[in-house]
Amino acid sequence: MARGSRDYSNALGGVAVSRLDDMGDLAARLGSIDVYDRGGNIVILDSFGEGVGAWLTTTYGTGAAVNTSTVYSKWPPYCVKLTAGSDGSRAAGLTKYIAPHPLGVLGLEIHVALFTSFDNLTIVIDQYTGTYLYRAGIQLNDVADKVYYYDSGYNLEELDDLPSVISGYGLYHSLKLVADIENQYYKRFLFNQTLYDMSTYAINATADSSQPRVLVGIDLKGRLGQNDYCHLGGVIVTQDEP
């Protein structure tokens, strides 16, 4: 037992063992992948250590594939390699369906290493209520060198210039999109160390009577004639974001 205070106290430091007030940091020290933003409560946390069996995989075009890989995994042993097809719709992606949630604030965080040039990488949060579909999304566009968001009409609007993101060394970029589904507005977008306040930007809302559910998706679209690829190191879905 640590000396200096009761073992259930974090108010006093011990002689041999220091206490931690930040439970998020304690979890990170024990191996959690939630080390980037730590906002909200976890709905899904996946580093793909058990493969991609929990996800719906989509592939379009010749050579398109979604596979686990041990190369440059952010949280070993595995990451997911998305390889876009060289023709047709030229894409590869992951989709996750989540049981119905009360309307609130949802977040989608991904960690991605981009090894080649590409057309675009898109992340989306969709919430179906049985009456409406609410949609929020961000796109990194390597052709236009822009970061876009989907506006209230689900059209792409420029958010910022796209910085250099391509590296052959397994350099992971952290992205987190947070949307206030209940009030039909974005909240913020985090791109590595850059924070975009999006609280004045409305999300898309369209009439839709399909089954209530939440959907999150990550899609890579490649260039014509190429099998562009990226690695996903981890995905986190949150609720009750501040």
Image (tube, rainbow, N blue to C red):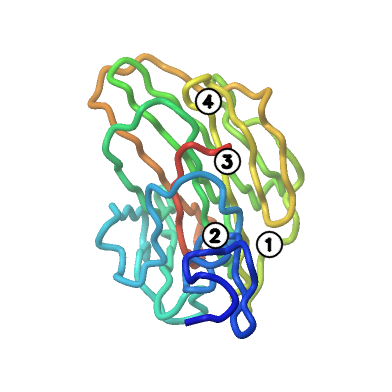
Question: Label 2: which residue?
Answer: 24
Q: Earlier in the sequence, mark 1 or mark 3?
A: 3
Determine the CA span between mark 3 and mark 2.
27 Å
Q: Nearer the viewer, mark 1 or mark 2?
A: 2
The amino acid on which the numbered mark 1 sits, given as a three-letter code, is Val
In-image side of 102 versus 105 (left or right): left
The amino acid on which the numbered mark 4 sits, given as a three-letter code, is Tyr
Q: Residue at x 37, y 56 (%)?
A: 61
Q: As rendered, which of 81 and 55 lies closer to the eye?
A: 55
Q: As rendered, which of 62 and 106 lies closer to the eye?
A: 106
Q: Earlier in the sequence, mark 3 or mark 2?
A: 2
Determine the CA span between mark 4 and mark 1.
25 Å
The percent position of residue 154, horizontal first and vertical second, equals: 53, 25
The amino acid on which the numbered mark 3 sits, given as a three-letter code, is Ile
Q: Earlier in the sequence, mark 4 or mark 1?
A: 4
Q: Residue at x 40, y 50 (%)?
A: 88
Q: Secondary structure at mark 1?
A: loop
Q: Nearer the viewer, mark 4 or mark 2?
A: 2
Determine the CA span between mark 3 and mark 4.
11 Å
> From this viewpoint, is residue 209 visible?
yes
Q: Residue at x 52, y 46 (%)?
A: 122
Q: Residue at x 48, y 71 (%)?
A: 7
Question: Label 4: which residue?
Answer: 154
The amino acid on which the numbered mark 2 sits, given as a three-letter code, is Gly
Determine the CA span between mark 1 and mark 3.
15 Å
Q: Earlier in the sequence, mark 4 or mark 2?
A: 2
In-image side of 60 versus 149 (left or right): left
Question: Label 3: which residue?
Answer: 138
Q: Nearer the viewer, mark 3 or mark 2?
A: 2
